[in-house]
Image: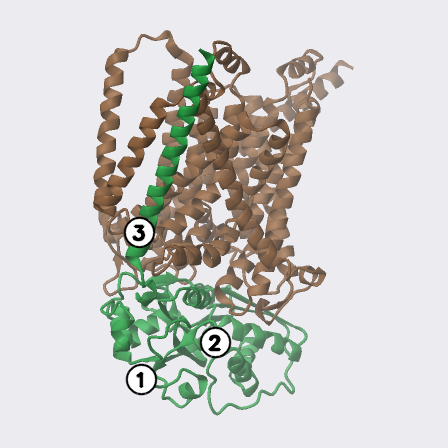
C-alpha cells in the first residue's frame, strides 16, 4: 500500500516537472515573439526636451517651432544634463542643450549645414542661440554693480567661454583699483547661468577679500522672484521676463549667449545635419523615423 | 510646616498642570501642521480653481501651462500617478508578502537574524539614489532588452517604485505575521495540517489586517514618491495616458514629477504657480483618501476578527460561495478581454493554456508537493528581492568606491563639483538633520506622552492620531511646496537652513510620535501603578519611572527620523538647498545637502560621473549607517526588556 502511494507520488512529481517545463517553454516563445515584433527601435525618433518653464525650451519653442505645439511624445527633462544623459543612452533620441553640454557621449548635428560651435555663433552663422541675463531691482549699485561689471569684462567673459558659452564682444578689462567692497552679496537663479556666476564670484572674492558672495541655484523663476522680493541682490535667468514678472522695477543685463546644440546619440548613423524645417517637423511629431530623413 | 508643605504641593500642582498643557500643545501640533498644509495649498491653488473651474482642472486632458492659451488639465497626470502605483504594487505585493512569509515562517533563526535587519536597512536607501540607478542602469537595460525606442516608461517607474516599496511592506507584513499567536499554528499542525496549509489557511488570514496595513503604507509611499519617478518615467510634455492603457512601455508623467520638474523655474504668483499648488492639493487628497480607506478597512477587519464566527452569517455559506465564484468569473473574463485588446489573440491563448495546465496540475498533485511548490515560490520571491537590491547596492558601491577617499570627504567641491570633495554637503546635511530633530523630537515625544499617558482613548486621541496618520501619509514634495509657500515666501525666511529644518521636522514628526507611543506602550502598567501608590504625581511618574525604560525606544524613533530626513530631497528642494561650496554661518542662510548635491551633479553638471557615484555612496553609507544604529539599538533594547 505504501509502495503504491510512493509510486503515485513519483508519477505526480514527474507530471509537475513536465508541466513546469511546458509552462517555461511556452512563456519563452511568447516572450521572444514580443521582442521580435518590435525590432529596429533605434530608428524611431525619441524626442527629448526641457520642461515647460525652462528658458531653453521657451527659446526653442519661439525660434524653431514658431510657437507651434510640440508633439505630445516630447519627453521632458528638468536640466540640460538630464537631456544630455538621456540622449547619450538612448539610440533613437534627439535633444537640445546648451553648447557647454556637448561632449563625446553625444553627437551635435549641423543645422542648415553649419556646425554648432562658439565661433559660428559669434559669427552669426549658427542659427540657434539666445541671451543670458542678470537682473537687479532698480539700477545696480555698490558691490552688485561691480560684480556685473566684472562678469561683462574681459576676465568675466573668459569664464563664460571656459564654461562653453558664447562671450560678449568688444569687452574691456576689469579694474578694481581704488575700490573697496565689503558686506554680503547674494546671487540666485537659473542653473544654466550658475556655472558662470559661481566661477566669477570665486575670482571676484579674490579681488575683494572683505566681501562675501553667495551664489545659489533654484531656477530662473526663483531667481527673479528672489530679486523682486529683495532676498537676493542679483537674479540669474536664461530667459527674459514674463508678463507676470514685468512692472516690478527689474533691470536686465546681458552677460553672454548660449548656443543651443541639437544632439543625437553617437550610434545614430542616419544623418549628420538637419535643416531648421526638418527640426521643426521632428519636434511637431510629423517625422517619427530617422530613416525618413536619411533618404 | 503645614504651610510650606501646602506651598510645595501647590507648586507641584501648578507644575502638573503646566506639563499637561505643554504636552497637549505638542499633541495638537500634528493637527495644526496638517491643517496649515491644507490651508496654504488651498490658498495658493485657489486662483487657478477660480479661473479654470475645479471640474475643468480635474478632467482637462492636456497639461500645457506655458502654451497659448495655457492649458491646465490634470486628468492625465492623475491617471498616470494611479497607473504607476498600480504597476508598482503588482510587483511589490507578491514579492513582499512572499518575503514576509519566508522571514516569519520558513527562515531558520540564523537566516532571520541576517535577512530581517538587511531588509529593514534597505528601507533607508534614499529615493534619489534609486533614481540615480534607474536613470543610468534600469532605463538602458529596458531599452536594450525589450528593444523599445526608450526605456523611460511606466514600466521603469513601476519597477523602481516596486523595489522601493518592498522593504517597507515586507517589514510591516512580517511583524504582522510574526505576531499571530503560537497557539493558532500549533492547533492547526496538531489536527494534521501541513505547514503550508497552516500558513495559507491560518497564519496569513489571521495577520490579514496587518498585511493590509503594510500594503496601504506601500501604496502611500509609491503615490508620493518624487525623485525616482521624475528621473525614470520620461515625462511626456502634456501628460499622456498610455495608449492602449495597457502599454507598459509608454512614457508617463505623474503629479509628483510635474511638481518636481516645474516648481523650480515657475514665476511666483503666476497662474502656472497656482496650478502647481492645485496639483499638490490633488496629490494630498489622493493620499488622504488612501489613508482614510486604510483606516476603514482595518477597522472593519478588526471588528470581523473580534466577532469571529459568533455572528450568524447574513447569506448562507452555499450562496456566498456561488457569489464568490461568479465574481471571480466576471473578473477573469474582464482580464481576458483587456489582454485580448492589448497583446493579441495568440499570447492570450498561450496564457490561458498555461493557466489551465497550472490549474490541472495543482488539482492533481498531493498536498506535500503543493507545499514544496509553494515554499519554492516563496523562497524564490525573497531571492528575487535580494537580487534586486543587491544589484542596486553593488552598482553604487563599485562605481562610487573609486571616488571615495579622505580628501573627498574633507574638502569642498571645485570646478562645480566635477572635482574636489563634498565636505560642505555633508556638513549641510548634518545641520539640516540636527535642526529637524531638535524641533520634532520634543514635539513628537510630548505628543506621544499626551496621547498615551494623559488621556483615555476617545474623540480627542482619535482626532490627534488621525492628524498624525494624515501627516505620515503626506507626500514629501507636498511638504516641500508647503515649506516654500509658508516659510520661504509668507514668513520671508528665504531659501534658508531654518525653512528646511522646520519642513523636515514636520515630515518626520509622525514617525517620532508613533515610535515613542510604541515605546511607552511597552512599559508595563504595573510600574506606573507602583509609582502612584508611593505618592508620586503624574509628571514625576512619567519622568522618573516611564521615560527611562522607554528611552531606547524613543531614541530608535529619533534615529529613524534622522535617517529619513538625511535622505530626502523633495522637501528641501524648494526651501533650503543651493548648489554651492557654501557652509552657512546663520540659520537664515541657504545650505547644500548630500541628496541635492547628487541630484544636481546627476542632472546639471556634465562630466561629473565619478563624483556622482562617490556622492551617492557617501549618502548611502550615511543613511544606512544611521538605520543600522537604530536597528542594533532596538534589538538590544528588545533583548534587555525583561519585566
Please say if the residues under marks 3 and 2 sit with CB atoms less than 8 Å apart: no
Instruction: Say if B143 sits above or below B551 in the image.
Output: below
Q: Nearer the viewer, mark 2 or mark 1?
A: 1
Place of residue B56 in the rendered image (x, y in percent of width and height, measured from the top left)? 22, 49
- Reading the chain from its start, which is encountered first: label 3 or label 1? 3
On residue B112, the disc is none
Circle 1 residues within 10 Å: few <14, some 14–19, many ≥20: some
User: Label 1 is found on which chain of the structure?
Assistant: A
Which chain does brown denote in the image?
A: B
User: Label 3 is found on which chain of the structure?
Assistant: A
Q: Which residue is mark 1?
A: A112
Place of residue B347 in the rendered image (x, y in percent of width and height, measured from the top left)? 26, 44
- Separation of marks 3 and 1 at Cα, in angstroms: 40 Å
On residue A100, the disc is 2
- Residue in front for this viewpoint, B263 or B209: B209
Please say if the residues under marks 3 and 1 sit with CB atoms less than 8 Å apart: no
Q: Secondary structure at mark 3?
A: helix
Which color has been applied to chain A in this rendered view?
green
Identified at 59% across, 31% down, the residue is: B446
Amino acid at each position: 500500500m505504501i509502495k503504491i502511494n510512493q509510486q503515485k507520488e513519483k508519477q505526480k512529481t514527474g507530471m509537475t516537472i513536465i508541466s513546469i517545463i511546458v509552462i517555461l517553454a511556452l512563456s519563452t516563445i511568447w516572450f521572444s515573439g514580443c521582442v521580435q515584433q518590435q525590432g529596429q527601435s533605434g530608428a524611431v525618433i525619441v524626442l527629448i526636451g526641457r520642461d515647460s518653464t525652462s528658458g531653453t525650451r521657451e527659446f526653442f519653442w519661439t525660434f524653431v517651432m514658431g510657437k507651434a505645439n510640440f508633439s505630445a511624445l516630447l519627453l521632458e527633462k528638468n536640466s540640460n544634463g538630464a537631456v544630455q544623459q538621456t540622449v547619450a543612452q538612448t539610440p533613437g533620441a534627439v535633444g537640445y542643450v546648451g553648447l557647454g553640454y556637448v561632449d563625446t557621449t553625444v553627437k551635435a548635428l549641423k543645422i542648415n549645414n553649419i556646425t554648432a560651435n562658439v565661433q559660428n555663433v559669434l559669427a552669426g552663422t549658427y542659427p540657434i542661440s539666445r541671451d543670458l541675463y542678470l537682473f537687479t531691482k532698480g539700477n545696480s549699485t555698490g558691490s552688485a554693480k561691480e560684480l556685473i561689471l566684472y562678469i561683462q569684462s574681459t576676465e568675466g567673459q573668459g569664464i563664460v567661454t571656459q564654461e562653453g558659452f558664447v562671450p560678449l564682444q568688444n569687452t574691456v578689462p576689469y579694474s578694481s583699483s581704488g575700490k573697496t567692497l565689503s558686506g554680503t552679496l547674494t546671487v540666485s537663479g537659473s542653473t544654466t547661468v550658475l556655472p558662470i556666476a559661481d566661477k566669477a564670484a570665486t575670482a571676484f572674492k579674490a579681488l575683494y577679500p572683505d566681501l562675501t558672495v553667495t551664489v545659489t541655484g533654484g531656477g530662473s523663476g526663483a531667481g527673479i522672484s528672489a530679486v523682486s522680493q529683495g532676498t537676493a541682490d542679483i537674479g540669474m535667468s536664461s530667459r527674459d521676463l514674463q508678463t507676470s514678472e514685468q512692472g516690478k522695477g527689474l533691470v536686465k543685463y546681458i552677460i553672454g549667449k548660449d548656443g543651443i546644440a541639437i544632439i543625437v546619440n553617437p550610434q545614430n548613423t542616419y544623418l549628420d545635419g538637419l535643416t531648421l524645417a526638418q527640426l521643426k517637423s521632428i519636434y511637431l511629431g510629423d517625422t517619427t523615423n530617422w530613416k525618413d530623413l536619411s533618404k | 510646616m503645614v504651610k510650606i508643605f501646602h506651598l510645595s504641593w501647590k507648586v507641584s500642582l501648578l507644575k502638573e498642570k503646566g506639563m499637561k498643557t505643554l504636552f497637549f500643545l505638542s499633541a495638537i501640533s500634528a493637527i495644526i501642521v496638517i491643517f496649515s498644509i491644507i490651508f496654504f495649498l488651498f490658498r495658493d491653488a485657489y486662483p487657478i480653481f477660480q479661473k479654470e473651474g475645479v471640474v475643468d482642472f480635474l478632467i482637462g486632458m492636456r497639461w500645457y501651462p506655458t502654451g497659448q492659451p495655457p492649458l491646465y488639465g490634470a486628468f492625465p497626470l492623475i491617471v498616470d500617478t494611479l497607473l504607476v502605483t498600480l504597476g508598482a504594487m503588482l510587483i511589490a505585493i507578491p514579492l513582499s508578502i512572499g518575503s514576509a512569509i519566508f522571514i516569519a515562517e520558513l527562515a531558520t533563526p540564523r537566516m532571520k537574524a541576517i535577512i530581517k535587519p538587511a531588509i529593514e536597512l534597505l528601507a533607508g536607501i534614499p529615493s534619489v539614489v534609486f533614481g540615480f540607478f534607474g536613470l543610468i542602469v534600469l532605463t538602458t537595460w529596458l531599452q536594450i532588452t525589450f528593444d523599445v525606442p526608450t526605456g523611460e516608461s511606466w514600466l521603469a517607474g513601476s519597477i523602481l517604485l516596486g523595489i522601493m516599496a518592498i522593504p517597507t511592506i515586507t517589514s510591516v507584513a512580517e511583524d504582522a505575521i510574526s505576531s499571530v499567536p503560537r497557539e493558532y499554528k500549533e492547533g492547526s499542525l496538531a489536527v494534521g495540517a501541513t505547514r503550508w496549509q497552516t500558513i495559507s489557511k491560518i497564519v496569513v488570514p489571521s495577520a490579514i489586517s496587518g498585511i493590509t496595513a503594510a500594503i496601504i503604507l506601500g501604496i502611500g509611499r509609491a503615490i508620493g514618491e518624487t525623485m525616482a519617478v521624475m528621473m525614470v518615467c520620461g515625462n511626456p510634455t502634456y501628460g499622456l495616458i498610455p495608449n492602449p492603457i495597457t502599454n507598459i512601455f509608454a512614457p508617463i508623467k505623474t503629479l509628483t514629477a510635474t511638481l518636481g520638474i516645474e516648481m523650480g523655474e515657475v514665476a511666483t504668483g503666476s497662474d502656472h504657480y497656482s496650478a502647481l499648488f492645485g496639483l499638490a492639493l490633488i496629490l494630498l487628497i489622493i493620499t488622504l483618501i488612501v489613508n482614510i480607506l486604510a483606516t476603514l478597512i482595518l477597522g472593519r477587519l478588526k471588528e470581523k476578527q473580534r466577532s469571529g464566527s459568533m455572528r450568524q452569517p447574513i447569506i448562507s455559506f452555499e450562496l456566498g460561495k456561488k457569489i464568490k465564484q461568479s465574481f471571480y468569473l466576471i473578473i477573469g473574463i474582464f482580464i481576458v478581454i483587456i489582454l485580448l485588446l492589448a497583446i493579441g489573440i495568440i499570447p492570450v491563448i498561450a496564457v490561458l493554456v498555461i493557466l489551465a495546465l497550472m490549474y490541472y496540475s495543482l488539482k492533481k498533485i498531493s498536498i506535500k508537493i503543493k507545499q514544496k511548490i509553494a515554499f519554492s515560490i516563496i523562497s524564490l520571491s525573497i531571492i528575487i528581492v535580494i537580487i534586486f537590491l543587491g544589484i542596486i547596492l553593488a552598482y553604487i558601491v563599485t562605481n562610487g568606491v573609486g571616488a571615495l577617499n579622505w580628501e573627498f570627504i574633507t574638502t569642498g567641491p571645485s570646478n562645480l563639483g566635477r572635482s574636489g570633495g563634498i565636505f560642505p554637503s555633508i556638513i549641510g546635511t548634518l545641520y539640516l538633520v540636527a535642526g529637524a530633530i531638535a524641533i520634532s523630537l520634543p514635539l513628537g515625544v510630548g505628543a506621544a506622552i499626551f496621547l498615551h499617558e494623559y488621556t483615555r482613548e476617545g474623540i480627542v486621541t482619535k482626532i490627534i492620531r488621525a492628524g498624525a496618520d494624515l501627516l505620515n501619509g503626506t507626500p514629501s514634495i507636498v511638504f516641500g511646496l508647503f515649506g516654500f509657500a509658508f516659510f520661504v515666501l509668507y514668513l520671508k525666511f528665504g531659501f534658508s537652513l531654518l525653512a528646511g529644518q522646520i519642513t523636515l521636522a514636520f515630515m518626520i514628526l509622525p514617525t517620532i510620535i508613533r515610535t515613542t507611543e510604541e515605546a511607552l506602550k511597552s512599559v508595563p502598567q504595573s510600574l506606573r501603578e507602583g509609582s502612584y501608590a508611593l505618592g508620586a504625581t503624574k509628571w514625576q511618574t512619567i519622568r522618573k519611572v516611564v521615560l527611562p525604560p522607554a528611552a531606547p525606544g524613543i531614541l530608535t524613533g529619533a534615529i529613524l527620523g534622522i535617517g529619513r530626513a538625511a535622505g530626502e530631497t523633495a522637501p528641501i528642494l524648494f526651501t533650503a538647498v543651493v548648489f554651492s561650496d557654501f557652509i552657512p554661518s546663520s540659520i537664515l542662510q541657504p545650505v547644500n545637502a548630500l541628496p541635492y548635491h547628487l541630484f544636481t551633479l546627476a542632472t546639471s553638471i556634465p562630466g561629473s560621473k565619478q563624483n556622482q557615484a562617490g556622492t551617492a555612496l557617501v549618502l548611502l553609507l550615511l543613511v544606512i549607517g544611521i538605520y543600522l544604529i537604530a536597528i542594533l539599538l532596538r534589538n538590544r533594547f528588545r533583548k534587555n526588556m525583561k519585566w
